[in-house]
Image (cartoon, helix red, strand yellow):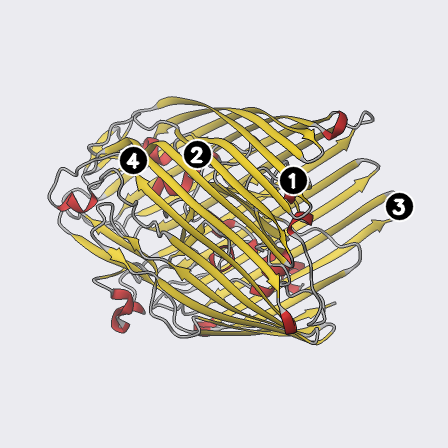
Amino acid sequence: MRQRQISLLVPAVLAAAGLWSIGLQAQEAVPANTNKDARLVEQVVVTASGMGTPREMHPGNISQISGEDIDFIRPEQPAELLNRIPGLGIQQGSGVEHLTAIRSPVLTSGAGAGSFLYLEDGVPMRAAGSANVNELMEAMVEGSGGVEVVRGPGSALYGSNAIHGLMNVLSRAPDDSFGGEVSAGVGPHGIRNLRGTISIPFSNDSLTKQGIRTSVALAQDADGFRANSGLDQVKAQIRYDYARLGTSLRATLTAVNIQQETAGFVVGPSAYKNDALRKGNPNPEAYRDAWALRGALRFEHLLQNGDKISLTPYARVNAMNFLMHFQPGTPVEKNGQWGMGLQSRYYLNLANGNLILFGIDSEYAESYLEEIQSGPTTAGTYVTGTHYDYEVDAMVLAPYVHSVWHLSPATELTAGIRFEYTHYTYKNLTGTGIAGRFLRPANSHDVFTDATPKLGLTHKFSDAFVGFVNLARGARAPQTSDMYRLQFRQVPGEARSEVLDSVEVGARGQWGTLSYEVAAYAMRKKNFYFRDVDGFNVSNGRTKHLGIEAEIATPLAFGFDIAASGTYARHSYDFTRIAATPVGAAESIYSGADMDTAPRTLANLRLGYNFSGALRAELEWEHMGGYWMDAANTQRYPGHDVFNLRADYRIVEALSAFIKVTNLFDTRYADRADYMCTVAACQQRYFPGEDRALYVGASFRF
């Protein structure tokens, strides 16, 4: 195994130190026969308007996973947690690598990076044009105070990349009293985890509230489920809160360091079932090293007239170095970016609870990318030497207005519009033109302007039933990789802003003890940009997306409870494009065909049990429906069903023990199934799912 070491300095104090699942959280001791009625209509969300807003009147879907859920699930990777949410499917790769789907097929390359917006306390974790398909690896989900997910276009507060959906990872706030927790666990193939948090209040009187919380999550997978696939990971976060007489401050600093040995696809028909292949690694030399540092300061002040101003300056820097094992020639890519920005908002509070929010988001970022192949020329076009070496300066300016109008005591209208200006300054640092199969454009300035209106209506029919209708447009400027990381046969400058229009109808409420939210949607997208199997730009692709999603939860008798999410969706092409070469026929696109890697059904069901206020247990069923592996709908993955078991036992007030068994019935399945075509041939490729695995550990609270 390649020598690895932690290169990010973390203060020694750090190392020392849900889904809306009603009745499901492993919280303080709760008698087994207690009906924990955490009603949906009483939940508060912050992603809707940037401040606490009752979920019941949110004009569209929003799902929430609490910090207590996260503490109970103890996810090894974010997919283990987030796949509980309807309409969301994260396919795990090797280690921290993953691909995301939110009301979409699983998307790759620039589309996979740019279609989803990842936030930390409402601040984007990366610059809009330099996102990453593996971006969740930089989120500190393990130690967060919760995660909120909006499926489909975000509100006017959120711009580029909030097109298919957004995730907002919430930092964990300091407590009113001193305390903390340390949790340690072990698992198969050398997995060791240490997670800790400590909260220190500085003052908590009638006028001033002030405190700090420090959290850390350390993880090591010494050997990896597959050969040469170990992982070292450090995540740390500090949050400081201050509030006095209508003025508040929240400062956060997050640091992440990841060093991973990477396992590539196993290749061949149903290779994920073959025990001689599934634990092997055809790319033992592959690796991925990455680090990120983010800081933000949110200042809010309540004016004497009842209005409020909010200013959030932020800065971030990150870098990554990895071997591109999936390409012939296995070049090394190095990329990184630094940037800073300011979110400015003015909350104009009108009579009768009406609100108009005026905002301007501004950001400047500089990024770089280089790709160098040190080995010999391969396949004739993967040439030795520099493939790409460029820099991009990006500026984004986005004014917007978001308003909430109380048409009656039971009816709210939400309306808004966002204008976004994106300017890229691209500088090529190597030879311009074609080198092998790689095309390096000449220096350029590129500008994109987008307008995204939103309109939502929410009506409270009764205390137990709320309905909503939401019309929204999402748009995003192209990723810089789509603009400047081209290959021969592609044409510079063809990428345009992707636009998605969405209509959604839904309801949420309470039926007896059962809480629910259900939503149906129809979306149409244009300017879907990708490179086809023959190497040509597709700059005007069109797709359609139809679906229905539901999540429910209810307590049962004798200490049992149940929660579930389910999705039925159809993601299809809305244009026809016939591949030019015989090999490319597997990637020919026909209007009305399913998009590849787009399962029609997703489901998650949890049966929970509370015993004597000390034991919490949960049996989970994860369902992934079958899907086409290729655009022409000729190769199919049959789908899978996997079961997991978790339990948390409070031995004494300060000490708990936990156990987790994943893939309880040792099912052979694939986390990801793919069909890859080159000029020579096509082949099935898989990331095998892990065998049955046992994790145990303990938590100490003080």
- Spatial CA span between label 3 and label 4: 60 Å
Residue 146 placement (x, y as % from top left): 61, 52
Where does the image place residue 536, in percent across and percent down from the top left? 21, 34
User: Disc 1 to disc 3, how far (Cα)?
Assistant: 36 Å
Residue designated by label 1: 460
3 vs 2, front mark:
3
Question: Callout 1, which amino acid?
Answer: Lys
Res. 574 mark? 4
Of the two numbered discs 1 and 2 in the rendering, the one whose residue sits closer to the viewer: 1
Q: Amino acid at mark 2?
A: Gly
Q: Amino acid at mark 3?
A: Ser
Q: Give whichever of 437, 140 is nearer the camera.
A: 140
Count every numbered label the image shows and give the total: 4
Q: Provide the residue designation for mark 2.
A: 129
Residue at 41% across, 75% down: 665
**SS class of the residue under badge 2?**
helix
Dots 3, 4 in contact, CB < 8 A: no
Query: Residue 430: which quarter of the image?
Result: top left
- Give, as a three-letter code, the residue at label 4: Asp
Percent x, y for residue 115?
A: 42, 39
Q: Position of residue 586 (x, y in %)?
A: 18, 47
Which residue in the structure is indicated by mark 3? 206
Q: Residue at x 13, y 46 (%)?
A: 583
Residue 162 shows up from this direction: no
Hey, which quadrant is residue 281 in on the image? Answer: bottom left
Q: Nearer the viewer, residue 377 or 42?
A: 42
Q: Is residue 87 visible?
A: yes
